[in-house]
Amino acid sequence: MTGVRAEATEQWLELVRQEYPLTEAAFVRDLGGNYNLNLQVASDRGALVVRVTPDWIEPDRLAAVQAVREYLRARGWPVPRTIRTRAAGTTVPWPFRSARWSGRRFRWRSSVRR
């Protein structure tokens, strides 16, 4: 991890394969982001973006952002669809490590959008 942003690793890709209904997934490129890690992934379902948000983004806030996206998408706005995990969730906790930033401990969560 560099600074406060997660880095693309093989562990991330394996977590995506395990938690999301994908049989194939490969990193294409890092799409950038100040705090979020946004990865373009090629999969058996087409091109996807895996978004990794730091833990200081509260789960309620992340759920609210995803709800707004789904609301807009349902009304015809060109908003990517959030892909549900195998357990029907919209986020996956990052189990491998945590980091420190400004005295706050945080873990990483991921979500996948198409």
Image (tube, grey):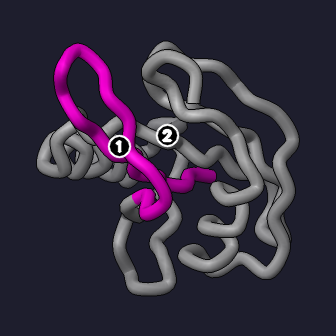
Mark 2: amino acid: Val
> At 61% from the left edge and 67% from the top edge, which residue is drawn?
15
Question: For the magenta stretch, what is the residue range?
Answer: 94-114
Secondary element under disc 1, as helix, strand or loop, is: helix
Total marks shown come to 2
Disc sitting over residue 94 in the figure: none
In this rendering, the answer to whether 109 lies above or below 55 is below
Q: Is residue 57 left or right of residue 23?
A: left
Q: Quadrant of the N terminus?
A: top right
Q: Is residue 95 a member of the stretch shown in magenta?
A: yes
* Residue sitting nearer the eye, 62 or 52: 52
In this rendering, the answer to whether 70 lies above or below 24 is above
Disc sitting over residue 69 in the figure: 1
Q: Residue furthest bottom?
A: 87
Q: Which residue is mark 2?
A: 79
> At 74% from the left edge and 41% from the top edge, which residue is drawn?
40
Instruction: Determine whether label 2 and label 1 are within 8 Å by CB.
Output: yes
Magenta-drawn stretch, dominant element (helix, strand or loop):
strand
Q: Position of residue 104 (x, y in %)?
A: 18, 27
Q: Is residue 67 left or right of residue 37?
A: left
